[in-house]
């Protein structure tokens, strides 16, 4: 196994899948929850998007749409850990997946050991500061 500082996101996600195979369905559900949230609020997010650096609303929504495509497959990706990691954690797609994991780690139903593993492998700092204004 590689040293943690030599691992890329695919390696880290693969390790997470091996350590917590029973949690993969919950992780995919957490990604689905985030997809639903962003898609339901797309207009508000796009109108209020404050671009600072790499993340544009268009880029972010391409990541969301890619994740949604994986969720919409006939056979759930969580049933095949290799597919799960390849779809959600390859290249730029990992940005959204990691966002989802960090958000899920803050939820009460997240297994405490899984939370620790997420924070160890991916950190705990959120990629986005999300505030929806009530109009």
Image (cartoon, rainbow, N blue to C red):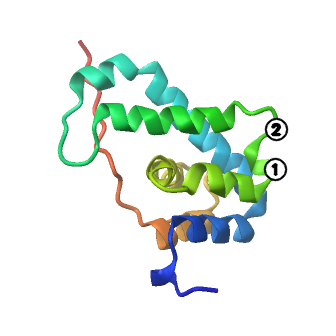
Q: Nearer the viewer, residue 68 or 112?
A: 68
| Circles 1 and 2: CB atoms closer than 8 Å | yes
Q: Position of residue 82 (x, y in %)?
A: 73, 59
* Quarter occupied by the C terminus: top left
Quadrant hosting residue 21: bottom right
Label 1 SS: helix
Estimate how packed mark 2 is, as few (under 14), some (14 to 19) or many (20 or more) residues with alpha carbons within 10 Å: few
Label 1 CA crowd tier, 10 Å (few <14, some 14–19, many 20+): few
Q: Do we see residue 109 in this rendering?
A: no
Looking at the image, residue 135 lies above or below residue 12: above
Q: Is residue 39 visible?
A: yes
On screen, residue 135 above or below 41: above
Between 110 and 67, the residue placed more toward the observer is: 67
Marks 1/2: CA–CA distance? 8 Å
Residue 79 image label: 1
SS at circle 2: loop
**Residue 44 place in picture, x, y as percent:** 31, 19
Residue found at x 49% / y 56% = 91
Q: Which residue is farthest front? A: 91
Front-most of 48 and 130? Answer: 48
Residue visible at 19% across and 38% down? 51
- At x 80%, y 32%, the residue is 74
Q: Which residue is mark 2?
A: 75
Q: Quadrant of the N terminus?
A: bottom right
Q: Where's residue 5, x and y in %?
A: 45, 82
**Label disc, if present, on residue 95 of the rendered structure:** none
């Amino acid at each position: 196994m590689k040293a943690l500082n030599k691992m890329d996101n695919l390696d880290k996600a693969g390790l997470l899948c091996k350590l917590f195979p029973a949690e993969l369905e919950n992780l995919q559900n957490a990604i689905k929850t985030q997809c639903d949230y962003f898609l339901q609020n797309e207009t508000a997010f796009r109108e209020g998007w404050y671009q600072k650096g790499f993340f544009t609303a268009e880029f972010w929504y391409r990541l969301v749409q890619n994740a949604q495509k994986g969720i919409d497959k006939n056979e759930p990706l969580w049933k095949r850990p290799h597919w799960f990691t390849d779809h959600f954690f390859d290249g730029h797609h990992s940005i959204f997946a990691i966002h989802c994991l960090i958000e899920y780690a803050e939820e009460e139903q997240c297994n405490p050991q899984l939370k620790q593993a997420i924070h160890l492998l991916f950190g705990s700092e959120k990629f986005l500061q999300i505030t929806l204004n009530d109009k």
